[in-house]
Amino acid sequence: MAKGVNSTLVYILGALFMVSFVFVFEAMLTIFSTFYLDAFAKKLVQIERNTKGISKHEQSEIRNCNLFEGSWVLDDYLDPLYNTTTCPFIRKTFDCTKRPDRQYLKYIWQPTACNLPRFDGRDFLKRFNGKQIMFIGDSLSLNNYDSFLCLLYVSVPGINYKTKLTNQSVTVIFEDYNVSATLFNSLYLVDVEEEHIGKVLKLNSIKNGEIWKQADVLIFNTWLWWARRKPRQPWDYIEDGGKVVKDMNRMVAFRRGLNTWVKWVETEVDLTKTKVFYQGEAASHHYGEDWGEPGVKGCLNQTTPVAGSIYPGGLPLPAKIVKEVLKNKSKSIFLLDITILTHLRKDGHPGNYNGYGGVDCTHFCLSGVPDTWNQLFYVSLLHLTS
């Protein structure tokens, strides 16, 4: 009898053990599968975003979304779309391959109310076959331009291109699609001319416009040089309304120069043919109190963005002026409002890991933040042309 009971007890315990083992095994398998399937799914989404244009569902979602309100989100599965070994257009100024940390490449811009599709270079080249895209501005336009070239170049393996240079511009022509991308150097957008008294910054004159308005898409930017003074200031006098002065309030000068540019766009550009963008003011990170770290000087050793969607230092005055000048101008000029999202990226600069020496807390690493500027440009341009 005892022997039978013992056998039954052993059987029951063995059965319970097997049930427990199966339960634990299934739980572990579920956790394992969920983790790796999630990782795999994210990778598939990334691949899909890299190989497709914007779907109708995404277009509808974006139409009702402010793309410029959001935060930077860490995505460990994110791979940069290019690097210095795969793109020949990255200048040493923006080359951060010597930077020891790589986490700055793992952040995506997440708008609050929608998802931002990745830049699809092949789709861009097909859609804008035979068109000219022109960036006009200072070295931050150059930063943006190099990113744009790389995003197009790596989208079609073996793509053929040629380069044209003038004393004020560089143009890269992607021959397989006859798409040309031009950078036109213009620090102020308005003219600086040599006269008998010296170089004069003319707040009411734009003579290069005859070249600009030939393009199909224009992306303008200015501000970086407006606040600079001697010896780096590249002019001797300012002319405003026919009056020549040695200097004036730089914010007033900036506003008047922008107003001249807006008037030029609205009177000289064929807006049925040409789409016009203004690239919002980017960000320099020199003083930690601006982002909530008093006592910190410069961008060195910054490895993460500012958390959240609000920049502690607020909107800088030049950006406020841009918004005021462009208010009610949305039918003629689209504002790529990158100011706050760029200010949040105190970690995105070359610092002292650039190719020319010194510490750079004004421009951004490539690959890096300017790729997001071009994502926003791409999506916004498709919205305007669809």
Image (cartoon, rainbow, N blue to C red):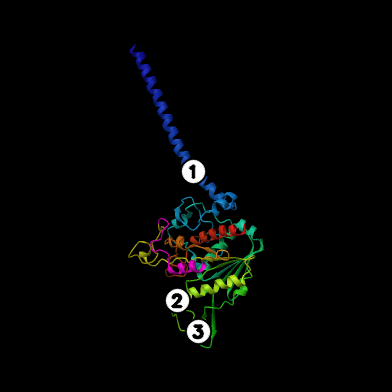
Residue 384, relative to residue 40: is it above or below? below
Whether residue 204 is situated above or below residue 63 in the rendered picture: below
- The earlier-in-sequence mark between 1 and 3 is 1
Residue 165 position within the rendered picture, expressed as x and y whole percent measured from the top left: 61, 73
Residue that label 2 marks: 250
| Residue at the extreme top of the image, as rendered | 1
Mark 2 neighbour density, 10 Å: few (under 14) some (14–19) many (20 or more)? few
Magenta segment boundaries in residue numbering: 307-326
| Separation (CA) of disc 1 from disc 3 | 66 Å
**Label of residue 38 in the image:** 1
For marks 3 and 2, give the CA distance.
16 Å
- Left or right: 290 as drawn, with respect to 60: left
Q: Tell me if label 1 and label 3 are in contact, CB under 8 Å.
A: no
Q: Earlier in the sequence, mark 1 or mark 2?
A: 1
Sooner in the amino-acid sequence: mark 3 or mark 2: 3
Q: Secondary structure at mark 3?
A: strand
- Tell me the residue at 38%/66% (across/down): 298
Labelled disc at residue 199: none
320 or 144, which is in the foreground? Answer: 320
Q: Residue furthest bottom?
A: 196
User: For the residue marked with disc 2, what is the amino acid?
Assistant: Arg
Q: Position of residue 236 (x, y in %)?
A: 48, 83
Residue 11 vertical position relative to residue 1 in the rendered view, above or below: below
Describe the element under mark 1 as helix, strand or loop: helix
The number of discs equals 3
Quarter of the picture containing the C terminus is: bottom right
In the drawing, what numbered circle is on residue 243?
3
Residue 307, image x, y percentages: 40, 56
Closer mark to the observer between disc 3 and disc 2 = 3
Q: Please name the amino acid that badge 3 sits on.
A: Lys
